[in-house]
Amino acid sequence: MSGTTKTGRSTWRNWAGNVTARPVREVSPASAQELADAIRKAAEDGLKVKAVGTGHSFTAAAATDGVLIRPDLLTGIREIDRTAMTVTVEAGTPLKRLNAALAREGLSLTNMGDIMDQTVAGATSTGTHGTGRESASIAAQIKALELVTADGSLLTCSEKENPEVFAAARIGLGALGVVAAITFSVEPIFLLTAREEPMAFDKVTAEFDALFAENEHFEFYWFPHTGNCNTKRNNRSAGPAAPPGQISGWIEDELLSNGLFQLVSSLGRAAPATIPAIAKISSRALSARTYTDIPYKVFTSPRRVRFVEMEYALPREAAVGALREVKAMIERSPLRVSFPVEVRTAPADDIALSTASGRESAYIAVHLYRGTPYQSYFTAVERIMTAHGGRPHWGKVHTRDAEYFAEVYPRFGEFTALRDRLDPERLFGNDYLRRVLGD
């Protein structure tokens, strides 16, 4: 199977519709060799190159007016190694395909984010993560990766091979080259018991450290304009599997989380004054439930309501204080916020530009329905997050620049020096990378 090339400017849009790009040509390589050829050809033609995934980033990380590399044909599982307990996949493979294929083989990733529409390369390059006491982001589960660099050469990176590239390229922002394949660590499939339970804001925040310590995966959502939260604890279980009943599962995941939420979000956008009253009702509509299933069916859920999002990683001990500041800010402002605020955690890892690099972290994520003006809310939240040395998610809305990142990432200089070596001409550059990494 060989790839395709499309010339002429068609418009590429991200999932939320807040970023568009008009590349000169689009290339869908079907192999690492075709990917390397496309990169060399772009360099010869004096065009910049960006690879896109499924567009789940809210930033312009993948936008280009040069050559856009599409992932559609660079997909599939290349190898499962049961001795090393790894799986090697092509970069454009969607996470949902990887999860389902691993489950058929009796295997699973250790942890994952809450959606699985992204490609493996898109998710890892921007630092996608779930929540976990010991288990970290998807990128932290990478054992090796193949990277096509600016001169068209294919670098294999791991702890043993090109270790200095491996230390940075697992979350590379598309700045070091284009990822062709990724090898993840896997484990025998296991069961998780999820316990979802409403809890008062004051109780969750007072007991946050204990809830974190007692659960393998803990997260909670706070509903602005209320004192109500919904908590979720996921822990490994001996079974047996007991998935949510079809009806109750549909009510929670489809009716409340997608259908009704879509309606409520549209109403809130049209009539913001109704939001606090709706929030009080909807935050009470959720009831406690417990279910047991294989990991991807517990960690992930469908997200059909389109939104924009900002998320910051803080030192874990700063999270509760920062969240209380966000709550106080919303209460004294004219803001009307229809989306819950999400709080998750991650252990420290050793990836240069990981939001959890070198420090135990907690994440605070704020969302607004697509099409709602978000600047004033996000700006006010960002002011609180940066006062705590927060690190924004690379794929979500933020206004930080290289000067700021040099302060909050001890290994920032290591990353930019590697970029100077691998891409001195900035073949993989764009406006977003110029802002966050400098020239």
Image (cartoon, rainbow, N blue to C red):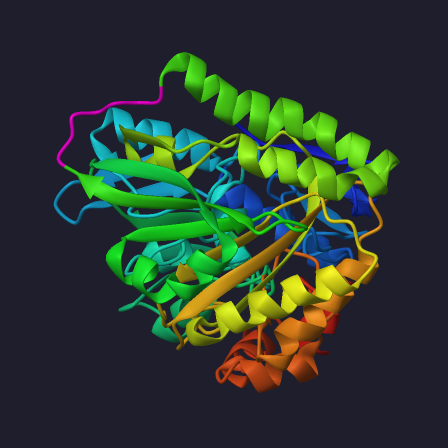
- Residue 31, x across and y down, in percent: 49, 39
In the picture shown, does residue 210 fall above or below 4? Answer: below
Picture coordinates of residue 265 (x, y %)?
Answer: 74, 34
Residue 167 quadrant: bottom left
Secondary structure character of the magenta stretch overall: loop
Number of marks in the rendered image: 0
Left or right, 397 with respect to 145, comes to: right
Question: Left or right: where does residue 216 sit relative to residue 430?
Answer: left
Q: Quadrant of residue 264?
A: top right
Quarter of the rendering occupied by the C terminus: bottom right
Residue at the (73%, 26%) spot, across then down: 263
Question: Closer to the camera, 241 or 348?
Answer: 241
209 vs 137: above or below:
below
For this orientation, the residue located farthest to the top is 247
> Residue drawn 83% across and 44% down?
22
Whether residue 136 is visible, yes or no, is yes
The answer to whether residue 341 is magenta is no
Give the residue displayed 40% in from the left and 56% down from the top. 137
Instruction: Give above or below for 338 relative to 325.
Output: above
Residue 287 vs residue 334: left or right? Answer: left
| Residue at image coords 64%, 77% | 386
In the rendered structure, which segment of residues is drawn in magenta?
238-244
Choose between 98 and 147: the one closer to the eye: 98
In the rendered image, residue 242 lying in the magenta stretch gets the answer yes
Q: Nearer the viewer, residue 416 or 194?
A: 194
* Residue 96 location (% of width, % of height): 44, 32
Q: Residue 381 in the image: x percent, y percent? A: 69, 66
Q: Is residue 221 above or below residue 315?
A: above
Give the left or right position of residue 19, taking residue 31 as reference: right
Residue 26 visible in image: no
